[in-house]
Each structure stands twice: as C-alpha cells, then as structure tokens.
Amino acid sequence: MTLWLWLLLSCVLAYAWKLVGYLVPASLLRNPRMSRIAGTMTIGLLASLTVVNTSASGQALALDARLGALAAAAVALWLRAPFLVVVLAGAGAAAGLRLLGWS
Amino acid sequence: MGVEPGKAGPESAAPVRLAQSPAVRVGLSISIATGLYGVSFGALSVTSGLDFWQTMALSLLLFSGGSQFAFIGVVAGGGSGVAAMSAATLLGVRNGIYGMQLNALLQPRGWRRFAAAHVTIDESTATSTGQTDPAEQRRGFWTAGLGIFVLWNVFTAVGALAGSALGDPKQWGLDGAAVAAFLGLLWPRLKGREPVAIAVVCALATVLAVPFVPAGVPILVAAFVAALFGWFSHGRSDEGLEPDVDPYAEEHEAARRAGRGRGEAS
C-alpha cells in the first residue's frame, strides 16, 4: 500500500516539473546553469541506473549473466539497432548465458 | 490566409494539410517507435513487483519513460519507495526545461497549457524544436505528444499482461532487458567526451556507494555528483537533453555523412 503512495507522489511531482516550465516566467528558468544541471543529472542518473541494474544485488556487487546483457546491448547500440531490438538483445544474452549455466 | 480553399483556416483545412505536414509525419513515426517500447516497460514493471494498475498508473500519470524506468529499476533492486520516487523525480527535472522551451515556442493558452505540460517529454520536444515554422512546431508537438501517449499506454498494458504470464522473469532474461533499456536510454546522450566523462564518474560513484548505503541510494549519490559537475563546469547547456529515439535520425545521419564528406574532401 505504501508503494502506491510513493508512486502517486512521483506522478504528482513529475507533472509539477513539467508544468513549472509553462507557468514560471521564462527569465527565472532561462538560467543556463539550471539547464546544464538538468542535463548532467540525466546522464548521471541513467549511467547509475545502468550500473545498478547490471551489478548490484541488494547491497552486494555481483558479476553474473547481466554483464553479458550489458555487452550485448552495447553491441546492438553500436550497430544502431532500434531500442526494442537493444532490449531484446539484453534479454536474449542474459537468458542464453543462464541456459549455459552462468547465473 | 483564407484565399485558397485548402488554406481557408486551421480547422476546415486540417485533413488536407495534416497529411502533407512533415512534422505530423515525423510525429507519427516517432509515436510508433516510442510507443512500441512501452511493451518492455510494461513487462519489466510487473516483473519488478508492481501490479498491473500500478504499472498503468505510471504510464498514464507519470508519463516520462526515463522516470518510469527509474522508478521500477529502484524497486526491482530492493530500494525503498522514497528512493524510487527521488530517482524518478530527479530524472524529471529536464522536463521543466523542455516546458520552458515549448512555452516560448508554442505559447499554449488556457486548458491547452495543462494538457501540453502532461505530454512534455523528450520526444515531443525534439519533434517540435526540429521544425522551423511555428505552425509545424505546434503540429509536431501535439502529434508526437498525443500519439506517444496513446501508444505508450496501449503497449504498456500489452507488456504488463505478457509479463505477468511469463513466470520466472530471470529465465527469460528480463533483468538483462532492464540493463539494456537503461543503456539504450543513456546511449544517445553520450555525444562527445564530456557526457562520457560524466557517465563514467557517476558509474564509479555508484559502484563505490553500493556496499555502504541502502539499495536505491547509490543512484541518488550519482545524481548529486552529476549535479555538482553541472554546477561547477561550463559546457553545452543542452548536454544530456536528447530524446531516446531521435525523430530526425535520418536528417541527422545525412548531415553527419555530408559533414564527414566535406571533411575528407578538404
């Protein structure tokens, strides 16, 4: 039940960010530093989420089939595959490595 | 305006002009490309431990791909609801910047402003700002925004239903799919040396933090490091503000080739 609470709060905050851009006078937000932080934070968060989903297992670090998924996704992206193909490559690599016995 | 029958007014001539509008064509194709990967979000969300309606609530109400993936990514890793909310909210900051750009560009009034805010995401912004004519900018924004909203939700539902029928998510490599999805969201933003440096530093900060803080918190540590980087360094002010799926990929690719051709010739 508490997950619902945080989830709905996330939705409210997400909409609030979007709306702020439309309602706040442009001069306030046209600060280049603000826009830069929004950008660097997007890169940092996505890099962090990639690493956490690849190697974290609770509070421990683990090297498992997910590392193969990361490599397969990188190759697919290098070959300019569309997003859905990249995701399928990641799933296929992890599933395949598990079939071969690497957890 | 109002001389030729085909250009009588924005309402009466809409069907004729919409079919010829480049922004509408781009908006529709980006809607299909982005909407389709709602399948992966839906499937990953239910296997992360969210139920069908929680998954749908994220797609209907939060409606911002990166933040949605962040929320379920933190939950899947055993993080708390607060950590999931914080990661999703921090990833949503850039939508405020987009809102400001679009407000200046499209100047929506009344209820349209509130509707526009909801469909203000990477792709609708990129489709709009890629056009030069104000009318085309408006059409591009609404076509991409509404098109993605509808398809993203339809395909989230498809993915969520398929995901719940799958059984053991690990056997299907769905944790690997999540890894690939995050790398796929990050990849288009790694243009140049600086964003790569930010990504590497934040990845290292994450790895170092994992053993010492509760699950979910390492992501917030990385966000803090990235914010410091943005505060103290001076670079492009639109760093990292690129769509996951580039609406103008063909044009950009052609420009890249042309630029390279010129470079080789000279």
Image: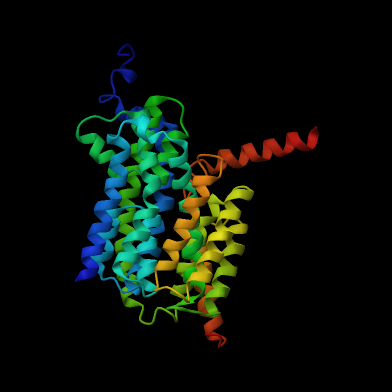
- Let me know if residue A103 appears in the view: yes
Return the residue nearer the eye: B63 or B234: B234
Residue at the spot 29% in from the left edge and 17% down from the top edge: B8
Image vertical order of residue B94 relative to residue B216, above or below: above
In the picture, residue A63 is in which quadrant? bottom right
Q: As drawn, which residue projects farthest toward the top? A: B3
Return the residue nearer the eye: A51 or A29: A29
Q: How many marks?
A: 0
Residue at the spot 40% in from the left edge and 67% down from the top edge: B217
Q: As drawn, which residue projects farthest toward the right? A: B266
Return the residue nearer the eye: B194 or B191: B194
Residue B12 in the image, given as x and y percentages of width and height: 25, 24
Left or right: B257, with B158 as reference point: right
Residue at the spot 39% in from the left edge and 61% down from the top edge: B69
Residue B210 in the image, given as x and y percentages of width and height: 47, 73
What sort of colour scheme is used for the picture?
A: rainbow
Q: Quadrant of the N terminus of chain B?
A: top left
Q: As drawn, which residue projects farthest toward the bottom? A: A101
Residue B70 in the image, given as x and y percentages of width and height: 39, 62
- Let me know if residue B60 appears in the view: no
